[in-house]
Amino acid sequence: MEWQQSTHPPVSGQAVTVALSDQEKLHMLHPGQIIAYDGPSGGRHDRLMDVKGMYRKRNLIRADFTGPCRFVASLPPGFNMIPITIEPGSDLLYDFRHLFYYTEGITMQTRLLKLKNILITRDVVKVKFGGQGEIGLLTQGTVMEMKLHPSTPIYVDARSLLAYPENATLKLSVYGNHLASQHMHYQWAITGSGSILIQSGHDNGELAEHLNDDSLFRRILREVIPFGGIFIK
């Protein structure tokens, strides 16, 4: 299987082309994003997802493709698609919501999270992919790999964690002094062996606001002068 992703300004979104060779099979979980198809009409067969798939993806239909064929899928603005090869023995856990497609030969197992983590992160289960094949993940921003340490934690913004080893230890935490801990999103303090995947696309808007503002002095005046936010632009 081959794939190619085009790059455009974030405001316009992107597109990814996936090409399957003869008898290769792929399951596309967001068929509504397909904008072009090149292949025999019988190379695509849509079907209802099972109940688990409907719940996790908030979608009813998946599209099954059999090569030789290729299709082009559009991606939402700010999103990328990265292919990941799954080998036997892979122990990374993923959020099912990020899954864009998977090839024939991929198996899935669910892992239920702890109640406290569910209440804070609003994630109920993670998915472990097995077998052999490829998955495509929808991500925001750049994807990076970081190696874990058995005893010294890596702190990762809970919104940016893409995948982690099943044997890793995760604890919701904050770090730094009192002021730092009051002004950050929940962090995963992660220890273990292997590596994690993180994505850089989450932004709380503070940096853009800072860069677009004229000066710190203007910001202070807006706060301290009555109706400053109206008169001082």
Image: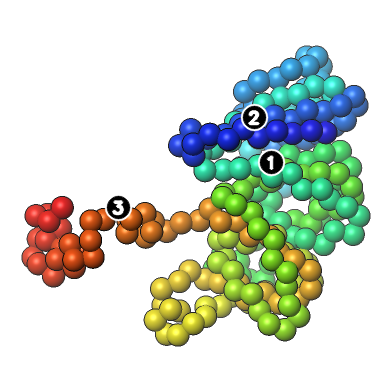
Q: Quadrant of the N terminus?
A: top right
Q: Residue at x 86, y 44 (%)?
A: 133
Mark 1 vs mark 3, CA separation in Å: 35 Å
Disc 2: CA contacts within 10 A as few (<14), some (14-19) or many (>=20): some
Number of numbered discs on residues: 3
At label 1, the amino acid type is Phe
Q: Would you say the residues marked 1 and 2 are in contact, meaning their CB atoms lie under 8 Å apart? A: yes
Please rate how many residues cluster around mark 3, counting C-alpha atoms within 10 Å: few if below 14, some from 14 to 19, many from 20.
Answer: few
The residue that appears at 45% across and 71% down in the rendered structure is 184
Read off the residue under disc 3: 212
Which residue is at 79% across, 73% downward?
A: 193
Assign a secondary structure to mark 3. helix
Give the spatial CA distance, label 1 vs label 2. Answer: 10 Å
Q: Position of residue 115 (x, y in %)?
A: 63, 71
Classify residue 182 by image quadrant. Answer: bottom left
Of 129 and 136, the residue lying toward us:
136
Using a 10 Å C-alpha cutoff, classify the residue at mark 1 as few (fewer than 14 neighbours), some (14 to 19) or many (20 or more): many
Q: Position of residue 114 (x, y in %)?
A: 67, 71
Is residue 92 placed above or below 37 in the rendered structure? below
Which label sits in the foreground, 2 or 3?
Answer: 3
